[in-house]
Amino acid sequence: QKTKRLDNKIETVKNEILERMYSEIGKLYNEIGKLRSEMNERMGQLRSEMHSEIGKAKADIIRWMFVFWIGQFIGIVGFLMALVQLLSK
């Protein structure tokens, strides 16, 4: 009879432990789900910030390309004008 009570007690403790374990696992899954959604939200924000910054960088690069090309064009035109004036004398 003592062994039967001991077996019952062991079974009860085992069930309590399993119940608590499953409860804690459920809490962990909920927490993981929350963290996942927060990460996805933040990644979306970072992605849009990155696209904005890339767009600004592209605009800056294009602006400096035009400044360079205009400077080159003016330099070549000035050189050709000077060459024409030297050859026409």
Image: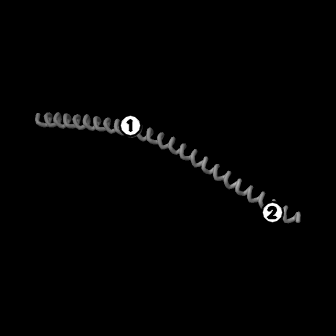
Dividing the picture into quadrants, the one containing residue 23 is top left
Q: Which mark is residue 82?
A: 2
Name the amino acid type tagged 1. Gly
Residue drawn at (62%, 51%) of the image? 61
Residue drawn at (38%, 40%) of the image? 35
Name the outermost residue toward the left: 2
Residue 63 is left or right of residue 21, and the answer is: right
**SS category of the residue bearing label 1:** helix
Residue drawn at (22%, 35%) of the image? 16
Residue drawn at (54%, 46%) of the image? 53
Residue 45 is left or right of residue 21, and the answer is: right
Query: Which quadrant would the C terminus be assigned to in this image?
Result: bottom right
Depth check: give the residue in front, 33 or 43. Answer: 43
Query: Which quadrant would the N terminus be assigned to in this image?
Result: top left
Residue 2 is left or right of residue 82, and the answer is: left
Depth check: give the residue in front, 62 or 54. Answer: 62
Q: Nearer the viewer, mark 1 or mark 2?
A: 2
The residue that disc 1 covers is 33
Label 2 crowd bin: few (<14), some (14–19), many (20+), radius 10 Å: few
Name the outermost residue toward the right: 88
Q: Position of residue 82 (x, y in %)?
A: 81, 63
Label 1 crowd bin: few (<14), some (14–19), many (20+), radius 10 Å: few
Q: Position of residue 58 (x, y in %)?
A: 60, 48
Q: Position of residue 7 (x, y in %)?
A: 17, 36
Depth check: give the residue in front, 82 or 25. Answer: 82
Depth check: give the residue in front, 18 or 85. Answer: 85
